Image (cartoon, helix red, strand yellow):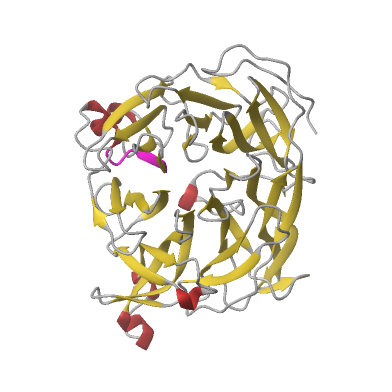
Amino acid sequence: MLAATPVAAAAQGAPTTAPAEPAFSNTTLFSPASPAAFPLQPGATTAPHSGQSGNSEPAIAFGGPGNVMAVDGLGQMSVQVNLWKGHFGETPPAYFGAMDTFLPTNGSGRTTVGDGDADVEVTSAGTVLLADLDTLVNRGVLGGHAPLSSARLGVSVTRCPAEASGPSGCTTTPIDVAGADRQWITTNGENAWLSYHDSVESELIRVWRSTDDGRTWTRVASPISGQGGVTGDGMANNRVGPIVADPQSGNVYEVFMTGEASAEKGKSEDFNNVYVSRSTDGGESWKAQLVYHAPRSTNLSNFWPTLAVDPATGVLWTAWSDEHGVWASSSSDKGDHWSAPLQVSPAALTTTVMPTVAARDGKVDVVYYGSTADSVDEATAVWNVYDAQLQGGAWTNGRVSNAPNHVGKICLEGEECTSDRELLDLFEVAEDPATGKAAVVYTDTTTDTWTLGGVTRQLPQIVLAYEQ
């Protein structure tokens, strides 16, 4: 564990006596292999857990009566998103099933043959809403009449009512079948909002809204359009983070990063600006506010920008990484003004990436992957999961993982990566409403392996960690 390191809290006043650093218990979530129509790795085998599909890029949420916990992970051995349901402290929560592995996509002439990354939320009714990318192929592919290379990504929302005991009790609504990427979902009561990149129309950020517990969806305005210079910098030159709903004000917020169009559009993803757009009318209109501007060519996109709202105080928190430190900023006036960024990771961790944030009742957890290596390109780098926690007016840093979760390089180029991408691009933290403690789901590449063509590789699995 790192020694407790109190630092002044951003927008929270002077530090008080540092609390004990956070401690976590860890358990790996395995999922039974479930063959999809087009396995990503046909002929692959796993060892020593030969019956497992492998999971990465996990998400977590709490909500509904009894504080239902939902966890998802992207299966690496087959084209599926795996889902677990339970409650804080269960080791492990119950495996719910493999989601959306084969779905006709209504009226599009295309069929879903598997999933990509996902995000999950739970409504006040206890309904689980899973937003995931779909691998879409022309239906002729199924009869051998078209190449699989014609596949593209769409996005859908799968709705699982509280009484559903497995995927057969869920229904799926296709949202976009023309090309999409990196989707996020949020809820407030039985209202929900979905955001994603429209990869066909210059990576515009699209937003859809449901007012009936996820049954039906209507497109609303984009948080990046009509924002003057922000639009110019952000169109086809942005990285989209979570969409977040505030139960206090009813506002909806979307975080994104941009570069500078005059110098970087189409050339670089070294995004140096952090923005948060706010909607006060359910997504019908938006106003963007700059959170932080770094010098041109400074890369803050390691990986997604992140955002959370404290449901008790309405304070917004965002965090990002410049690769050598994790920085946090907060707003107590609904996003009009933001505090000066504060480095919440300790200097001893010289390389830090993929922050994620959660907040509740004045407590904040900024969780990230950290190493003492000089860069993400160091082949011998040893990585762990860390939590920078604000409680009682002071920050402390503690280790979440009870052993290293990854050894080696980490590629942060997304789909441009040709290797070293076992961690993919996402993991998450959430606060349990009942206990006020954090639950973290992260990727571990040290537990399992898989073999293809005689070559043995790391097989990611996801780990669920509960704050003690």
The reply to whether the magenta stretch includes residue 212 is no
Which sits in the foreground, 311 or 11? 311
Residue 382 left/right relative to 184: right
Percent x, y of residue 252: 34, 39
Residue at position x 55%, y 35% in the image: 359
Considering the image in quadrants, where does the C terminus appear?
A: top right
Residue drawn 40% across the image and 38% down it: 246
Q: Is residue 73 above or below residue 410?
A: below
> Would you say residue 280 is visible in this rendering?
yes
Q: Quadrant of residue 232?
A: top left
Residue with the most extreme top position: 14
Total count of labels = 0
Q: Name the main secondary structure of what is drawn in magenta.
A: strand
Question: Residue 67 appears at what percent x and percent y?
Answer: 57, 53
Q: Is residue 258 left or right of residue 325?
A: left
x and y percent of residue 83 in the render?
56, 65
Image side of residue 8 versus residue 447, left or right = left
Which is more toward the observer, 455 or 173?
A: 173
Q: What residue is rendered at 42% in x and 27% in y?
A: 272
Quarter of the image that includes the N terminus: top right
Query: Is residue 407 visible to us here?
Result: no
Return the x and y of residue 194 as percentages of the image width and height: 35, 52
In this rendered view, identify the residue nearer to me: 461 or 284.
Answer: 284
Residue placed furthest toward the front? 65
Q: Which residues are magenta?
A: 235-242
Depicted 41 relative to depicted 360: above or below: below
In which quadrant of the rendered view does residue 212 lie? bottom left
